[in-house]
Image (tube, coloured by chain):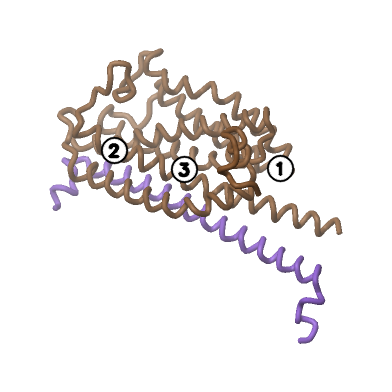
Chain colours: A brown, B purple
Amino acid sequence: MTPMSDLTSIQRFHALANPARFMALSEKIVAPLAILTFALIATGLYFALFVAPADYQQGETVRIMYIHVPSAWLGMFGYMIMAGASAIALIFRHPLADVCAKSAAPIGAAFAFITLVTGSLWGRPMWGAWWVWDARLTSMLILFFLYLGYIALWATIEEPVRAARAAAVLALVGSINVPIVHYSVVWWNTLHQPASVFRIDGPQIASSMLVPLLIMALGFTCFFVTLLLVRMRAEILRRRVRALRLAKAGA
Amino acid sequence: MAQYLDMGGYAAFVWPAYAVAAIIMLGIVIASWRDLTRQRGLLAALEGDGARKRAPARSMDHLK
């Protein structure tokens, strides 16, 4: 293998797509990333549960926000990773792209599920209902179902190349839902409150609450990336196992 | 302490929210890690098997 330092940036991008190089690199970074994830989430939890104040309207239920909001971001981020990797898989036949898309789906689905459950647990005391068919909640539920459909499609088609293509098309078609989730609170008159962090006029949230929220969001993002690498490694090994078994059966 | 755990009367909502997040996140970590170690084991077994078949002369197995 040519040393990475001798390559141009485009060549370096392609070299990282080489599964052997990916396996070597990811093996080195998984452990430090896992330690960073643990440290960030532990710090975030300390701030969220012990340091951050109660809200003047929501009381202590505001603490649910520190897991609900990062989960919602990661639920959408996961889908964008999945759709982006699916587009790369379809257009460039990048060897790692569909491995990445397939591996991201269960993590994104897990975050979408956490978002729905924690939102429901917050909604009951604050809105007086576990669930309302509000545009934000409904589009988030559709996002969760899209993840499940994507995972199910991979499971039903045995041949990886055909499964990858069908799943990539579903991921791309479903990606239309991500901006709908994000802008639902702007486009429709929803019960769900509008964005208070990612706004043109800057975050509308006190720093005593913003800091724990951002630490948790960073921790959840590191969690996502670490787990994505672990799952991608397992998927590459699974394909090698499959190839070896087929070769053996054919011999 | 009891006052803290009561979460201003919202304990029945705050703690289950954290518990669900912890269970789901730990669950997916354990499942992913187990899958990785399983695939590693399967591959090692297959590659070991293939290596023995390809190079019987270098193996001492036939002497046992």
Residue type, label 3 = Val
Is disc 1 placed on a helix, strand or loop?
A: helix
Q: Is residue B11 left or right of residue A182?
A: left
Horizontally, residue B30 falls left or right of residue A67, namely right
Q: Nearer the viewer, residue A249 or B8?
A: A249
Label 1 close to label 2 by CB (< 8 Å): no
Label 3 element class: helix
Q: Which residue is under mark 3?
A: A225
Q: Are marks 1 and 2 on the same chain?
A: yes
Q: Chain of mark 2?
A: A
Q: Which residue is mark 1?
A: A160
Residue at the image point whose x is 41% and y is 18% from the top: A184
Extreme residue in the bottom direction: B64
Percent coordinates x, y for residue A185 in the rendering: 37, 18
Which element carries disc 2, helix, strand or loop?
helix
Judge depth for marks 1 and 3 and give the one in front. Answer: 3
Camera-side residue of B17 and A40: A40
